Every structure is written in C-alpha cells, then in structure tokens.
C-alpha cells in the first residue's frame, strides 16, 4: 500500500486544525482570569465556579440532562425495534420505503424537523415544554440508534438462535436469551450516541420548547447575544467534556461486540 504524499498529509493536518483548533482555543480561554475573551489574564478557574453558581445555567442543565436521558431511552427502544424489523423481516411490502423513512431524519435539515414538530404540537393542542422537547429529540435520535442496532444485528449469527429453538426454546425466548445479551454493547452505544445528540441540540429544542423549559444550549445561545464571556467558554468546555466522555465510552463499550462477533 503506497504511503500518503506530503500534500495529502498537509491537507489532512490543515483540515483537522481547522476543525479542532477553535475548540482547543475555547478550552484554553475558559481558564482565563480576564473578562476579555481575547486577552489572556492568567490561569484561573473562577469562570467554572461562576457557571456552576449560575442558577439559570443549572436549571437549563437539569432540563437538558433529563430530556437527553429520557429521549435517549425512548430512541434506543424504538430504534432497536425498527432495526429488528429492517434486518430480520426483510420481505414485506414497503421494505425499501421503511428503510428510507428510518434514515431520513439523518439527512433532513433540523429546521424542517423543528417546524414540522411545532406545527404538529400546535395542531394537537399540546402545551410545549420538556415533554414536547423529549418527544422531538426521541424522534430525531431514533434513526441514529436504529443504524447502530442494525450494524450489530447484521453481525449476529442466526444459527445461534436456530440452535436454541431446536432445543425447544420459543422464538421470543431464544431472541431474548441469545441475541439480546450479544446486542448489549450496541444498546449502550446507541443510548450514549442518542444522549449526546439530544444534549447538544439547539435548533429542534428552540422550536419545540415553551415558557420555563429552556435547555442548556438555549441558555448559552441567549448569553452569546449579549457578548461572549469566559463563563460561556467554561460552560461550553463542560458540555464538550460530557460529549467526549460519552463518545469515548461508546467506543470502549463497542469493542467487546466486535471481539465477540469474531469469536462466533
């Protein structure tokens, strides 16, 4: 296999620097002692203390984490059921349409989803708040959970369940006792991915929220309107830490899945 040329290496390095250098600057300046974002005034953690002491930020964080946890659970359950239908039940009318509709939210603009859900809630007369945000996030993240579960279901050897059924185990029990334990890493990965996507969302939350139900990204956006302060950098760094932890944990948990599939 030929080695990449210097141009390819330089292009990759420039692309990664363009993506991640602003994030590095944000993290560094979150420890800035000065109120001026672009002027370094020494190392300090005062803005983290200020962010944690800000009652508005704390309330937004509580709503965000609660909505993300519930919506991730709903998305994982619904996405798993959709993945089972897509992988195990291949021959039914509208199979291709079902698969297309399942992954459509991944490429659909969030503004379109937000407006459509807003119109639906208004038409049904549902008061907007944490419940509507949770339902909207579950709808949005379900497709991502379904893709994760589909990739794991495709890897599973169906002969294991067939052997269990040959030994007298009913189909549902065989699936629960054979397939589900092997799918556990995928369940965790799907939940963590859905959780991080819900925690980061701003557009859909803005359309489906109501009075007194602002999420943490919405609080940050409202503060940025009046100017960027190191407190905003500290809050963003904390969110970045949670998201990175979720992605790393998802990656670690998914490794046993690959090993087990190789063992089978």
Image: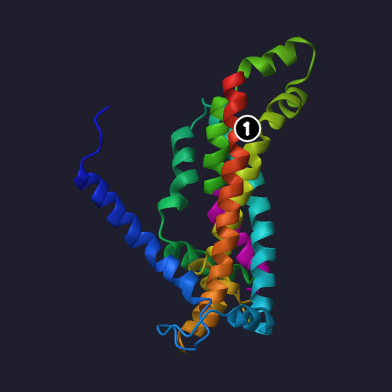
Residue under the point 25% across and 34% down? 3
Q: Position of residue 145 (x, y in %)?
A: 57, 45
Q: Position of residue 208 (x, y in %)?
A: 56, 70
**Camera-nearest residue between 179 and 263:** 263
- Magenta part, dominant SS: helix
Residue 233 higher or lower than 147, as above or below: below
Rendering quarter of residue 131: bottom right
From the viewer's perspective, is 170 left or right of 243?
A: right
Query: Which region shows up in magenta?
Result: 127-142
Q: Position of residue 256 (x, y in %)?
A: 62, 32
Q: Which residue is mark 1?
A: 256
From the viewer's perspective, is 117 left or right of 179?
A: left
Q: Is residue 135 magenta?
A: yes
Residue 78 in view, yes or no:
no
**Camera-nearest residue between 110 and 230:** 230
Quadrant where the C terminus lies? Answer: top right
Quadrant where the N terminus lies? Answer: top left
Label 1 environment density (alpha carbons within 10 Å; few <14, some 14–19, many ≥20) = some
Residue 259 higher or lower than 100, as above or below: above
**Colouring of the image:** rainbow
From the viewer's perspective, is 25 left or right of 164?
A: left
**Camera-nearest residue between 64 and 213:** 64
Q: Position of residue 255 (x, y in %)?
A: 58, 35
Q: Is residue 241 magenta?
A: no
From the viewer's perspective, is 112 left or right of 179?
A: left
Residue under the point 55% across and 56% down? 244
């Amino acid at each position: 296999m030929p080695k990449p040329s210097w141009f390819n290496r330089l292009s990759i390095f420039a692309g990664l620097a363009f993506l991640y250098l602003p994030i590095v600057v944000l993290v560094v300046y979150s420890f800035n002692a000065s109120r001026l974002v672009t002027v370094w005034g020494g190392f300090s953690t005062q803005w983290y203390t200020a962010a944690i002491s800000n009652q508005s930020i704390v309330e937004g964080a509580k709503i965000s984490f609660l909505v993300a946890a519930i919506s991730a659970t709903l998305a994982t359950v619904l996405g798993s059921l959709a993945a089972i239908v897509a992988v195990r039940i291949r021959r039914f009318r509208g199979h291709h349409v079902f698969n297309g509709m399942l992954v459509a939210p991944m490429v659909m603009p969030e503004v379109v989803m937000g407006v459509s859900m807003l119109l639906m809630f208004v038409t049904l007369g549902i008061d907007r708040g944490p419940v509507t945000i949770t339902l909207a996030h579950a709808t949005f993240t379900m497709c991502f959970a379904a893709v994760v579960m589909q990739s794991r279901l495709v890897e599973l050897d169906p002969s294991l369940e067939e052997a269990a059924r040959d030994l007298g185990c009913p189909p549902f029990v065989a699936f629960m006792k054979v397939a589900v334990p092997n799918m556990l890493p995928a369940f965790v990965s799907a939940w963590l991915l859905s959780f991080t996507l819900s925690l980061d969302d701003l557009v859909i939350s803005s359309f489906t929220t109501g009075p007194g139900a602002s999420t943490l990204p919405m609080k940050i956006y409202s503060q940025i309107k009046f100017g960027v302060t190191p407190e905003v950098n500290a809050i963003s760094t904390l969110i970045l830490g949670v998201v990175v932890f979720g992605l790393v944990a998802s990656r670690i948990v998914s490794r046993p899945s690959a090993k087990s599939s190789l063992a089978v």
